Image (spheres, rainbow, N blue to C red):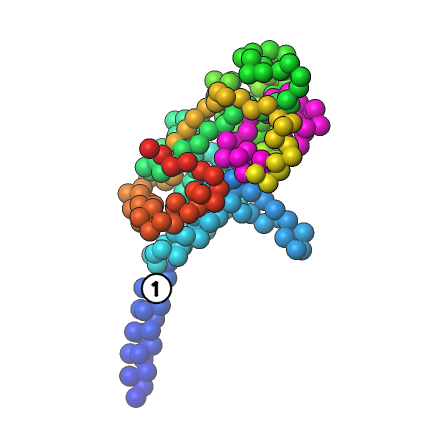
Amino acid sequence: MGKLIILMTMILSISVMAEERIIVNVGMYPFAPFVETNQDTNNELQPSGMTIDLISALNQSQKKYSFVAIQIPPKRRYQFYKDGHYDVIFYENKEWGWSNIDIDVSNSYQKGGEVYVALNKLGRGQEYFDDFTGKRMMGILGFHYGFSGFNATEDYLMKHYYMNFSYDNLKNITLLLKERGDIAVITKAYLKRYLTNNPEHKKKLLISEKMDQEYQHAVLVRPGIRPSVDEINGMLETLYQSGTLTKLWKKYGIERSK
């Protein structure tokens, strides 16, 4: 009887070990609509957005890995990666400061971009976005923008573009409406959702027809880890084939890569 109990215990332990998932730390920073922070009923900040929903979908679609969100500051995301705080990051682009860092890049499943937004004043048209000389630009700390040649150095941006930094798109739109800046660079997907929720502001804002930049979002993965970038591609393809990704894109106003 004792041997049977021991054998059953061993079998149970092996079964539990087999069911244990490999923890995968996913770095994320405020980047609406992919990562947003909102206050819950206890006035505590809780992350939400496309990244959170995607992590949930990945965890539900397979049993080998457990993806865990790790909040990181956008400006220090490279150092946090080098220090090993996370191994995977969604909705990045290799051109955003990653070119000299050893990291694998997944297939692209969606595209995005930023547009210029100013106050819609009498006599002001699209020509307002042709020249930024003397205008107060507004962006997010640690982000790379096309108008500056993707130079994200704070001193450079402040010296040449009178750049005012915040940590999210909503803050920049709010400051723009208060005339605390001249031109805000806003994520296109976020702006679309913002105007849907705040239609009264549509006539107040002048939105550029030209883009500051367009990009293909990818998942960046540390080489040699599990899951590999090929496994990530497979998981994303599974979510796409099931219709899960399409539903999330529609929810957040994101366009699929062609």
Residue 22 falls left or right of residue 172 = left
**Where is residue 171, by image quadrant?**
top right
Up-down relation of residue 242 to residue 194 (above or below) = below
Up-down relation of residue 116 to residue 174 (above or below) = above
* Residue 31 place in picture, x, y as percent: 52, 37
Disc 1: which residue: 19
Determine the residue positioned at 38% across, 50% down.
244
* Residue 113 place in picture, x, y as percent: 46, 29
> Is residue 214 visible to us here?
yes
Determine the residue positioned at 44% across, 53% down.
56
* Residue 194 place in picture, x, y as percent: 58, 37
Determine the residue positioned at 33% across, 73% down.
12
**Furthest-bottom residue in this view:** 1
SS at circle 1: helix
Q: Quadrant of the N terminus?
A: bottom left
**Where is residue 123, by image quadrant?**
top right
Inspect the magenta stretch and tell me whether residue 73 lies in it.
Answer: no
* Residue 136 place in picture, x, y as percent: 64, 19
> Is residue 105 visible to us here?
no
Count of marks overlaid on the render: 1
Inspect the magenta stretch and tell me whether residue 185 lies in it.
Answer: yes
Bin the neighbour count of mark 1 within 10 Å (Cα to Cα): few under 14, some 14-19, many 20 and up: few
Residues rendered magenta in the picture: 173-195
Up-down relation of residue 180 to residue 16 (above or below) = above
Q: Amino acid at mark 1?
A: Glu
Q: Quadrant of the C terminus?
A: top left
Name the one closer to the observer, 57 or 10.
57
Name the one closer to the observer, 104 or 186.
186
